[in-house]
Image (cartoon, rainbow, N blue to C red):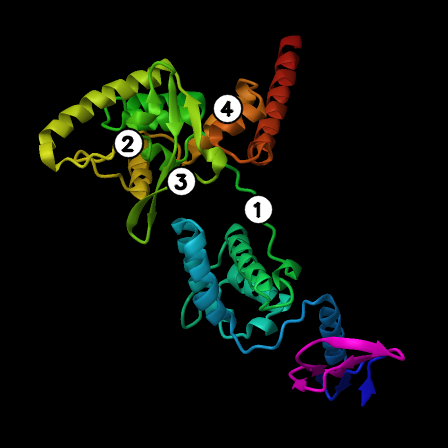
Amino acid sequence: MAQADGVNGSVADGLVHQPSGNAAEGSQNGQIKIQRKQRWRGGYPTKGAAEDALTNILGSLGDGEYVPPEKLTYGAYVRERWLPWVKANRPATTHDTYERQLRRHVLPFIGGVRLQQLDASRLDTLYLRLLEGDEAGDKPRKPLSASTVRVVAAIVSSGLEHARRKKLVSGNIAKRSDPPLAQRRRGSVWLDSELAAFLDSVRDDRLYALWRFYAVSGARRGEGLAVQWSGISSDAGTVTIAQQLVRVRGKILFVPPKSDAGHRTIPVDNETLEAFREHRQRRNVERAIFGDEYLDNDLVFCQPDGRALDPPGISQAFQRRRENAGLPHVRLHDLRHGMATGTLFDDGTKTELVSRRLGHSRTEITSDLYMRHVVEEAERAVSERIAARLRSAG
């Protein structure tokens, strides 16, 4: 039986003979004296793997980070410990996203694995399976995009980091895994002429003020739907974003903005303020029709009876109006992108001001998302100027 140098721990036939209880009481003649209560831990495929495990165990003993073996599975940990903690300490949207992604894409594959036996290679295999899909299996699964797999990987890593903090595992093995590199989505934005054509096509729409507000403010979908009359100042020409509207498991909820920076006051132009005034006149008529049955949430944009609008439903309504106008496909969220890139490139506005308007927590986020597009547009403009000079010279 081999014995590790200078320690009272041994390896034989793929088993680790490890101490249990308190770590070391002292040392004598180069030997570490450990309490006599001991435990055998098996399951290592080779003697070398067992020796590595022994080294890690002894190292964690010295660091005070030793985690006793436990039969808790990854699935049980997620369902019984981590997700309840997320539900109690994070926004409802975060819990809903985590639960849905784990239930669909993670737990069916590694939910039965013991938490402490989960390793980076298992996670790499999981991510590869998600990328490839399995449309020919008993339960067909479509391949996921690299971006979606990276979202899944980030959720897994967050959960394992929580387990590390709670000393259920000695480290976060997700940090040693290799999720796929996400391809940057080339965002589609309308030309100014196309955006103007859209706004002209919806000029008589009941929600015209909302479409215009999205176009000029860069507000997120839920932020626009949660704007209140008390947050609009006609004198200052501003709109305050103080909350957002989201749908979680069929329920429409008011929640805080995504970050502290998301709570902001946005200057708007006079035409947008005029659109708000016209919208309020229409809303007053609707309110009078419903009388006592009207639900007053002080919402600027809502259903005729005062109830909140459904966020996914607004995206669908936008697409119907876009199609009716015969315009190229963009998402409602791309109006936000269009405002950002157009302001940065055409107007030369400082990144800090655009970041503040968008409600980004750091200017680096704004630069990372939009500056590449701005540089590409600038390079294209240079090419056009060179071509124009050649034409004039000819």
Left or right: where does residue 61 sit relative to residue 279? right
Residue tagged 4: 342
Q: Which of marks 2 and 1 is nearer the N terminus?
A: 1
Query: Nearer the observer, disc 4 or disc 2?
Result: 4
Residue tagged 2: 324
Where residue 219 appears, as percent x and y from the top left, is 41, 31
Nearer the observer, 270 or 318: 270
Q: Which of the 4 image quarters holds residue 190?
A: top left
Up-down relation of residue 85 to residue 31 (above or below): above
**Distance between mark 2 and mark 1 Cα atoms:** 32 Å
Q: Which of marks 3 and 1 is nearer the N terminus?
A: 1
Badge 2 marks a residue whose secondary structure is helix
Q: Earlier in the sequence, mark 4 or mark 2?
A: 2
**Distance between mark 2 and mark 3 Cα atoms:** 34 Å
Residue tagged 1: 183
Residue at image point 33% right, 23% down: 232
Badge 2 density bin: few <14, some 14–19, many ≥20, Cα 10 Å: few
Left or right: where does residue 323 sit relative to residue 62? left
In the rendered image, which quarter contains the C terminus?
top right
Up-down relation of residue 259 to residue 207 (above or below): below
For the record, the magenta segment spans 18-47
Badge 3 marks a residue whose secondary structure is loop
Tag 4: residue type? Answer: Gly
**Distance between mark 4 and mark 1 Cα atoms:** 23 Å
Left or right: where does residue 37 sit relative to residue 299? right
Q: Is residue 101 visible?
A: no
**Distance between mark 3 and mark 1 Cα atoms:** 30 Å
In the rendered image, which quarter contains the N terminus?
bottom right
Residue tagged 3: 256
Q: Which of the 4 image quarters holds residue 280?
A: top left
Q: Which of marks 2 and 3 is nearer the N terminus?
A: 3
Tag 3: residue type? Answer: Pro
